Image (cartoon, rainbow, N blue to C red):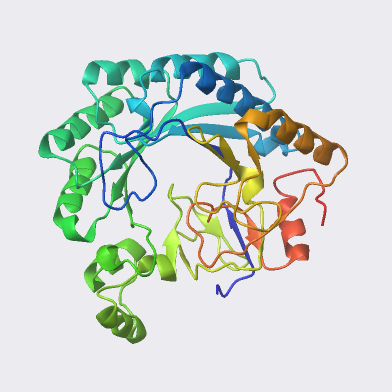
Amino acid sequence: MPDFNTLYPVKKIFQVAWESTLKCNLDCSYCGDGHDNSQKHPSLEESLKTVDFIIEYLNLHMSIKNKNNKFANLNIQGGESIFHPNILEILEYADAKKSKYQDWYLSVSLITNAIIGINQWKKISRLVDFFTVSYHPESLPKQQEMFRQNILHLKQSSKSFHVAVLMHPKYWDNCIEMIEFCKQHGINALPRQIDHPWSDFRFNYDEEQTQLLTGAKKISVATKVISFFRNGINLSAQGRACCGGESMCTEEANDIRYVNGNNFKGWQCSVDKFFLYIRQTTGEIFTNKDCRMNYDNKVGVIGYLKTSNELLDAVKHQIETNTLPTITCKKFSCWCGLCAPKARTTELYNDMMERYSNANTGN
């Protein structure tokens, strides 16, 4: 359990993660349910309807944000987002839709492995505001060369992006080489630990690797003992950094990069006020990709695409009546969603949230 009572980011925008397809051109061992190549790509018609829903959902939430927080980001991902055969049409449609709203700003980003031909990559990059480009060391050498070529194009085109290097303990030297390549070309590269269940020892780190990922100068004796019996150090159980490298604050510190203590069970959390996660292939709508806490204080959906108007009506009513619910965390660890403002008590939570929104909650 953390030794602080509040955790909130230096800056926070609303992040929509849209899993537009489950197909992927890679098959990484740590991906879990993040891809399924037996699934068909969702149709263009279904995809454009989802864009409509996302825009309307964001418009409701933006209506109660303070002036400095009226920013949202639509993050199109997969599977592999650029693997969808209609990705260009989807991006063009989203670009046209977002231009209709003048009192809040929407950016469009991609989480992608950037493994695609350069000609198609150039067409895609013109329609995207920001890229999170994930480097996967289990890929083939020719795919890694394509990755290098495409991130250099982003750099030369002055596109906004950063590289997330998935630090595989078995391919550590390969990952370090990619980080060095990025440094040589003035590219921002974020070493990112691989989240995994505590019982899966494949992605535990040794002491030297742990020091690089956490910034710790030395590892405690207790951690060394645990690592001996568990075949390495499971960073996911001890703490983590924000996926996007955001700085966070507590009541005592203003620039935390790595959060020690990763169990917020029982805390009040605003994950639903800053995140939305949509699985296009199943039609499920969640608060967040990893967290998935809902308003019944359980892990589960908050709605479905086929009945998305019901969800929009519910949120509109809650805003109008000042009855927006607050989620109480029931999870033992926090992955994506770590940067959602959260507090140990309802009173602290309400005070903290005034910096982001002018709406009251149902607490």
Expressed as whole percent of the image width and height from the top left, the position of residue 269 reads 65, 57
Q: Is residue 190 above or below residue 132?
A: below
Question: Is residue 69 something one can see in this rendering?
Answer: yes
Residue 6 is drawn in which quadrant? Answer: bottom right
Residue drawn at x 81%, y 39% as measured from the top left: 319
Residue 185 is drawn in which quadrant? Answer: top left
| Quarter in which the N terminus is drawn | bottom right
Q: Is residue 354 above or below residue 262?
A: above
Residue 63 is drawn in which quadrant? Answer: top right
Q: Nearer the viewer, residue 214 or 293?
A: 293
Question: Is residue 14 something one can see in this rendering?
Answer: no
Report the side of 125 relative to 106 (left or right). Answer: left
Residue drawn at x 68%, y 58% as measured from the top left: 297
Q: Nearer the viewer, residue 344 or 78?
A: 78
Q: Is residue 235 above or below residue 276?
A: below
Report the side of 101 relative to 150 (left or right). Answer: right
| Quarter in which the C terminus is drawn | bottom right
Q: Looking at this view, name the residue that lies furthest to the left.
A: 141
Expressed as whole percent of the image width and height from the top left, the position of residue 337 reads 54, 52
Q: Looking at this view, name the residue that lies furthest to the front.
A: 38
Q: Looking at this view, name the residue that lies furthest to the right.
A: 321
Residue drawn at x 31%, y 22% as measured from the top left: 157
Report the side of 129 relative to 286 (left or right). Answer: left
